[in-house]
Amino acid sequence: MKDKKASIFGGEQVLFLRLKKHKDKQAFIEAYDLYIDQIHRFVYFKIGNKEEAEDITSMVFLKCWNYVYEGNLENYETLKPLLYKIARNTIIDHYRQNKNQLTVSLEAATETVDEKQDIYEQTITNIDFKSLIQEKLPLLKDEYRDVIILRFINELSVTEIAKILGKTNGNIRVLVHRALQSLQEIINNKEVDSNPHD
């Protein structure tokens, strides 16, 4: 598994170098194919509307190409952190313009259970995951929602999330821990509210 991840990461770096040095359109098409599903899933879980998520995802890649074309890649090692930053900013702009409320479809829920889970991942998989996505995720504050989506839905590493959010690995671990605590509190409060006579 490590070798596979290393080869994928190596491939990402090669694509990135082609983009950075040559503004290679074919490399961008390959990067698009590599990242489109991840970015769309991230946007969809934040927006909750399929058509809007598709439009925003397209906009993210268009903006990313502008970064490439203008040579603004100095602070990045691969395209992934840049894509997620653009996606987050585009979603913020979308909410400012539309003032829409987040709704998440049950069909979007996918389990991300892994045999080598740490304590935080075990906490989240002990919850009814589909119920979490459908009902509880929108109740979290935005920063917590971001780390839950990035860590447990898109399955990014702590290091990748740190690069995307511009924080240290330690900050991300604390943020994930707090997000899960907040999520657990929301779930516990709902259970108390639904059983007022117990």
Image: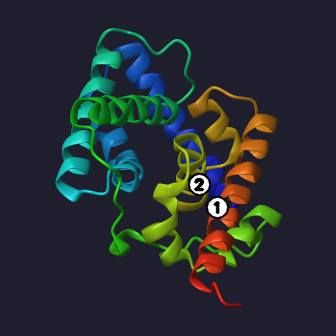
Pick the residue in front: 119 or 132: 132
CB atoms at circles 1 and 2 under 8 Å apart?
yes
Three-letter code for the amino acid on which mark 1 is drawn: Leu
Residue 135's disc number: none
Tell whether 6 sits left or right of 31: right
Q: Tag 1, which secondary structure?
A: helix
Residue 148's disc number: 2
Which dot, 1 or 2, sits closer to the camera?
Answer: 1
CA gap between label 1 and label 2 equals 10 Å
- Figure quadrant of the C terminus: bottom right
Q: Where is residue 46 in the image (x, y as percent from the top left)?
A: 39, 50
- Reply above or below: 162 against 39: above
**Quadrant assignment, res 15:** top left
Residue 183's disc number: 1
Is residue 26 at least partly visible in the picture? no
- Reply above or below: 97 against 119: above
Residue at 63% x, 26% y is: 166
